[in-house]
Image: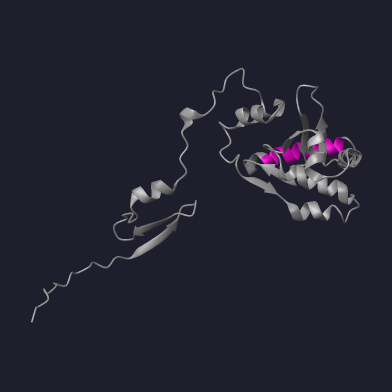
Amino acid sequence: MEQLSSTLPVLVEAKTVAVVPCGLGLRFFVDIESGEILNPTEQMQAKLPKRDLRRSAYVGITTPWPAAARDEDELWRAVESFDWWMGQSMVNAHNILQLLDVGLSDKAVRVFHHLARAISGRNVWFGSVAGLVEALGIPQRTVERALTELEQWRLIERKHQGRHWPLKVCLHPWYAWRGDLQLRDRVLQQWVLRTAKAGG
């Protein structure tokens, strides 16, 4: 009969551990007595988002201000070095639907929702009326009427940039925003002040 090799019991030292959250879904496990962090550092660093600033766009006197960007590429070049959350979009669909209750037409709400979901950055959408007609499948006159209605309600600001540049539409930042939400507060304040001065 074959004998199994005996295993010696190993004494494991008991530690009192505190769990400390540190954001990004990570947690530190800390030994209370020694203060030692028990998590493997390699695993924690692997979860943190890495950003190689050497690959960021050069920012100099030729870089446009975000407000002066004429298309999506210019807007991204202007903000990518400063805004780490450009990939995150916030569209408040509940607030957009509530616009129906205050008298906005269903077509205007539909156009506004489409613009909100397709913003390039901050609260800016670049495109054309023809592109909206194709995307929404509604007549051009209906789209133009909806845009005029949204302007009258101070929900958008349109800027025609000439034949060689797309139509630029800024949306009310309360309803849609892409990027750092702390920047949204300042833009929202400016939007409300402009609306108040215009009597809206």
- Per the picture, the main secondary structure of the magenta-coloured stretch is helix
User: 140 above or below 65?
Assistant: below
Location of the N terminus by quadrant is bottom left
User: In the rendering, at what x and y percent does residue 169 appear?
Assistant: 78, 34
Quarter of the figure with residue 137:
top right
User: In the rendering, at what x and y percent does residue 97 appear?
Assistant: 81, 54
In depth, the one of 168 and 136 nearer the eye is 136
Q: Is residue 150 magenta?
A: no
Image point 88% across, 41% down: which residue? Answer: 139
User: In the rendering, at what x and y percent does residue 48 appear?
Assistant: 45, 46
Please name the colour scheme applied to the rendered image: one colour
Please state if 88 lies on the left or on the right of 114 as rendered: left
User: In the rendering, at what x and y percent does residue 81 appear?
Assistant: 55, 31
User: 91 above or below 128?
Assistant: below
Q: Residue furthest top?
A: 61
Image point 33% across, 60% down: which residue? Answer: 32
Quarter of the figure with residue 117:
top right
Instruction: Give the extent of the magenta segment.
Output: 184-197
Please state if 68 lies on the left or on the right of 39 as rendered: right
Image point 68% across, 37% down: which residue? Answer: 120
What count of labels does the image hold? 0
User: 138 above or below 190?
Assistant: below
In depth, the one of 22 and 124 nearer the eye is 124
Location of the C terminus by quadrant is top right
In depth, the one of 76 and 138 nearer the eye is 138
Quarter of the figure with residue 190:
top right
Q: Residue furthest bottom?
A: 1
